Image: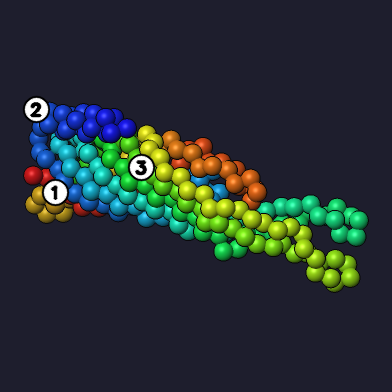
Amino acid sequence: MKKVIKLFILMLFLTVSRTGAQQYIAGAEGAYLFPYSGLAQRFLSAPSYSVFFGKEVSQDWTWLGKLEYFKYSRINEEKYHIKRIIQVNSIETEVTLPLQDTTIELSSAGLSANASYNIIRTDLFNLRAGFGFGIYRWESSFGSYHDTLYYTDSQGNQLIGEVLKNPPVKQIDWSGGFNIGFDVDLHIYGPLWFNTGASYKNIIGELWAVLSLDMENVSTFQMFQTKAGLFIKL
């Protein structure tokens, strides 16, 4: 993996260092990530932060190297429940029970190469379409879960339905990923520009299933992103 990272950084450096560039670009941005598909079954939205440096390699194309970080920690409580079939007075009944005090997180730091093409380019305004690919080190943790599920029968007696015991789960891995989207640049003053945009991001990782808690695996980390930031042209 270290060799792959070194090769990726070398390729990024050679790309950004191409001749014929118009200007260097450096900046930072904040973003909000909205999980999609399987990832949305576990998490709510989360912030993301990044810094970037690159070059305009022509009037139409810009290449950027970006270092980014995000962390999902807000649980989608509407999805955190289990369904069980229990016997109440010899009658099978399906009950839905919430999972309380669950701790789960997903964080990632990554380095990506990003290219954008100027659809509209003026001295005050740019509209760009872009794509990128990168390498991400991500970490997922699911805290141990112990709980006793109760139900009440027709006589008002509270009975034990099930005792849940799930050990902590932790994953650390490297994965490739890509993004595609649009950006709008607005000139503020001198070398300073404001940037905003939206994109789709996919990191090819997998979160394991927690079968005892009715949680299916997440095969890829899909998300939509809205962002805003500042950069300078040197």
Q: Amino acid at mark 1?
A: Ile
The location of residue 169, given as percent across then percent down, is 52, 49
Label annotation for residue 147: none
Q: Residue furthest bottom?
A: 156
Looking at the rendered image, the disc whose residue lies closer to the viewer, 1 or 3, is: 3
Q: Amino acid at mark 2?
A: Thr
Label annotation for residue 232: 1
Proximity of marks 3 and 2: CB atoms separated by less than 8 Å: no
Tag 2 residue:
19
Gap between marks 1 and 3 measured at Cα: 28 Å
In the rendered image of this protein, does residue 72 appear above or below residue 120? below
Gap between marks 3 and 2 measured at Cα: 31 Å
Residue at image location 8% in from the left, 44% down from the top: 234
**SS under mark 2:** loop
Tag 3 residue:
137
Of 138 and 26, nearer the camera is 138
